[in-house]
């Protein structure tokens, strides 16, 4: 057998292999990789990626401010999709770079990947830019970039096109009253097509950055043609209170579980950074979360979020043990965070992110640092005011009970397909198509006319309608036999599916919310009172768990020109006439009942979760006080009229005379 040589091995390789040899291997230089694969650096070429360019440049300016070298940043949006961001910091170095003879440091930073002053930690203790790709990527993906640097009382400038320098660094002359860096760029249409910067989005970005560092002033400017009702041509942002100011703006006039939000800031030990937080728990409304690391938004949260969740959860569990609430040990982070307005900002050295777009923080030490820093403050927040602590604990435990109830429902699957066929429901009930759970609602309405409007206005998937005739039986003064024989009560009990009195099992309730929706007049109020009496006496557990609500339909519709508003009552009408419609000729329409509203009006004002207002009917915080409530119900609604007469005599002096005169 002859010996096989290396040449023999490759002699029969087919030419169709594509001539895969050294010449087929490309070596991309400079910023060419960014233009070939922009998604690797900014996550794509869509609107989000376009605005990421602005965030990268703004982050550099913010790093100068956080490091204590800049106090002012200006963002200016001009026509032609041209954006400039300037700071009054130290200015990018312009001297010759030792590793690139003949090139200024500014040119190296703008035209070379992985170049910057944030690797060693000497120039910046904490920073948003980490990988040395931010401003160079912006330069690579811009059709034109101009950088001006005022440093050592001199003004320098250099221009670039698609990442390539268009000439050497220019010395423009003396600048004794100017310092810092200005980056002016226009995103390349070859990369982003005809996408334009959204003024409102940039305006919000600038505003949010000012909240994140109390020591910086951010000035916003845009061309007059780009300004709008939501975006002024000029604005200045400076918030000494930091995140606490931001939280106050977000919460607005909404009522919260605690009168004071939980806010604060704390340095980490050994100069590892710091954390700032602001948290509120609004009642009956959705919350929101905002997470930041070194002023960079991390919308997907991460380890700093985990640290905060652990601090709040363990703090509430410990407070529950302190006040004897044994069930508090079952509280989870979701129970604490659901519905809360949460803002958290950390500054740490060398943070690690999941991707170049920094959507999620992955630094493992952040969880420990944040938990230890926040936990002590949260313990004091709860214990310094025991009533405040109990109020928050009670609200969170209600969410816990609801979560456990839903879990039990999923495990047992109360309403199987077989059971649904056997389920007997009252004929007057217009049921929803949903299978029960958190989002289903039963509206108890007065009369067939209101029921007809409500059926057309409802969300068929989640909202059921049960009309009742006139005033329901007063169960506080009726015998048990009379209650059982009443058809309206029988239909209501059947629709709810949870039984009454000792047989009442709140876990079997077919709807998450029971909403009493009656006319906005005296008769409507009387019917609502009778229904509340029914639930208190026959289904108290339903009330205790927070399932019972009162709708708030309007009494008036006020119109002036094209503008219309709804008023709940006479006082609200007077307020609107004195503010919104001041000095205008107002047409006033009074709704005599729900049936007079067309379905669109009823949905908009009273039934749609996005625009309606509900009042939750509750029992005292300590359920053991139910006896005192029972005595009051008996006095006002019971069989003995003398009790009502005595109550009126004893409390007549408490009535506001101005209300009577009105």
Image (spheres, grey):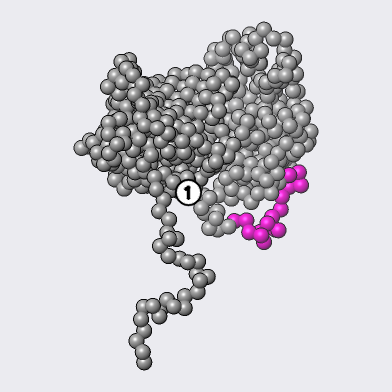
Seen from the viewer's position, the closer of residues 252 and 135 is 135
Q: Where is residue 662? Give x, y as percent.
A: 64, 10
Q: Would you place residue 275 above or below residue 36 in this image?
A: above
Seen from the viewer's position, the closer of residues 526 and 69 is 69
Work out which residue is located at the far left of the displayed protein and give it: 270
Residue 190 shows in the view: yes
**Relative to 581, 334 lies left or right:** left
Seen from the viewer's position, the closer of residues 77 and 469 is 77
Residue 324 shows in the view: no
Total of numbered circles in the picture?
1
Q: Is residue 428 magenta?
A: yes
Question: Which corner quadrant holds the N terminus?
Answer: bottom left
Q: Where is residue 13? Give x, y as percent.
A: 47, 75
Q: Would you place residue 12 above or below residue 625 in this image?
A: below
Label 1 SS:
loop
**Relative to 89, 438 lies left or right:** right
Seen from the viewer's position, the closer of residues 379 and 559 is 559
Highlighted range, magenta:
414-430
Mark 1 crowd level (few <14, some 14–19, many ≥20, 10 Å Cα): few
The residue at 59%/48% (across/down) is 437
The residue at 71%/27% (across/down) is 519
The residue at 69%/55% (across/down) is 423
The residue at 35%/30% (across/down) is 169
Which residue in the protein does label 1 denote?
Answer: 37
Q: Is residue 421 magenta?
A: yes
Q: Where is residue 594? Give x, y as percent.
A: 74, 29
What secondary structure prevails in the magenta region? loop
Q: Would you place residue 461 above or below residue 417 in this image?
A: above
Which of the 4 image quadrants contains residue 231? top right
**Relative to 402, 484 lies left or right:** right
């Amino acid at each position: 057998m002859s010996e096989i040589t290396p040449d023999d091995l490759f002699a029969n390789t087919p030419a169709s292999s594509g001539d895969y040899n050294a010449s087929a291997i490309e070596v991309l230089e400079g910023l060419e990789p960014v233009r070939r694969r922009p998604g690797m650096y900014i996550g794509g070429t869509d609107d989000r990626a376009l605005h990421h360019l602005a965030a990268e440049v703004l982050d550099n300016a913010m790093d100068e401010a956080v490091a204590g070298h800049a106090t002012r940043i200006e963002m200016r949006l001009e026509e032609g999709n041209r954006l400039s961001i300037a700071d009054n910091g130290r200015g990018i170095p312009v001297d010759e770079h030792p590793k690139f003879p003949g090139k200024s440091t500014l040119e190296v930073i703008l035209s070379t990947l992985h170049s910057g002053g944030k690797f060693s930690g000497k120039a910046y203790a904490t920073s948003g830019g980490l990988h040395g790709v931010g401003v160079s990527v912006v330069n690579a993906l811009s059709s034109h970039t101009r950088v001006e640097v005022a440093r050592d009382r001199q003004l320098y400038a250099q221009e670039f096109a698609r990442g390539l320098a268009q000439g050497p660094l220019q010395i423009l002359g003396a600048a004794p009253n100017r310092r810092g860096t200005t980056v002016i760029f226009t995103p390349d249409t070859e990369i982003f097509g005809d996408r334009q910067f959204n003024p409102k989005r940039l305006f919000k970005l600038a505003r949010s950055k000012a909240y994140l560092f109390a020591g910086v002033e951010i000035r916003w400017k845009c061309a007059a043609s780009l300004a709008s009702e939501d975006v002024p041509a000029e604005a200045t942002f400076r918030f000494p209170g930091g995140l606490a100011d931001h939280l106050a703006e977000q919460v607005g006039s909404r009522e919260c579980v605690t009168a004071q939000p939980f806010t604060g800031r704390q340095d980490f030990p050994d100069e590892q950074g710091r954390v700032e937080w602001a948290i509120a728990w609004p009642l009956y409304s959705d919350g929101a979360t905002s997470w930041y690391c070194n002023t960079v938004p991390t919308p997907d949260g991460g380890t700093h979020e985990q640290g905060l969740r652990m601090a709040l959860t363990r703090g509430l569990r410990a407070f529950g043990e302190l006040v004897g609430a044994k069930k508090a040990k079952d509280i989870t982070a979701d129970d604490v965070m659901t519905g809360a307005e949460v803002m958290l900002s950390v500054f740490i050295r060398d943070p690690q992110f999941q991707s170049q777009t920094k959507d999620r923080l992955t630094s493992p030490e952040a969880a420990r640092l944040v938990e230890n820093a926040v936990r002590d403050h949260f313990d004091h927040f709860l214990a310094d005011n025991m009533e405040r602590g109990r109020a928050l604990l009670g609200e969170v435990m209600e969410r816990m009970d609801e979560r456990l109830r839903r879990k039990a429902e999923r495990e047992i699957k109360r309403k199987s397909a077989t059971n649904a066929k056997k389920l007997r429901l009252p004929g007057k009930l217009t049921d929803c198509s949903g299978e029960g759970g958190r989002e289903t609602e039963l509206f108890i309405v007065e009369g067939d006319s209101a029921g007809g409007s409500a059926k057309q206005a409802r969300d068929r998937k989640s909202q059921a309608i049960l009309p009742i005739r006139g005033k329901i039986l007063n169960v506080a003064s009726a015998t048990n036999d009379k209650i059982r024989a009443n058809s309206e009560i029988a239909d209501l009990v059947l629709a709810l599916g949870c039984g009454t009195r000792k047989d009442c099992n709140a876990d079997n309730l077919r709807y998450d919310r029971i909403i009493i929706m009656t006319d906005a007049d005296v008769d409507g109020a009387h019917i609502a009172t009778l229904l509340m009496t029914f639930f208190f006496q026959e289904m108290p557990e339903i009330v205790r768990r927070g399932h019972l609500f009162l709708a708030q339909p309007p009494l008036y519709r006020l119109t002036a020109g094209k503008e219309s508003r709804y008023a709940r009552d006479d006082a609200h009408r007077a307020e609107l006439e004195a503010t919104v419609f001041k000095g205008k000729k107002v047409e006033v329409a009074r709704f005599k009942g729900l049936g007079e509203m067309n379905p669109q009006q009823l949905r908009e004002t009273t039934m749609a979760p996005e625009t309606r207002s509900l009042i939750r009917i509750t029992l005292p915080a300590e359920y053991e006080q139910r006896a005192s409530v029972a005595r009051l119900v008996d006095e006002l609604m019971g069989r003995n009229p003398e009790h009502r007469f005595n109550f009126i005599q004893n409390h007549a002096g408490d009535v506001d005379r101005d209300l009577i005169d009105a």
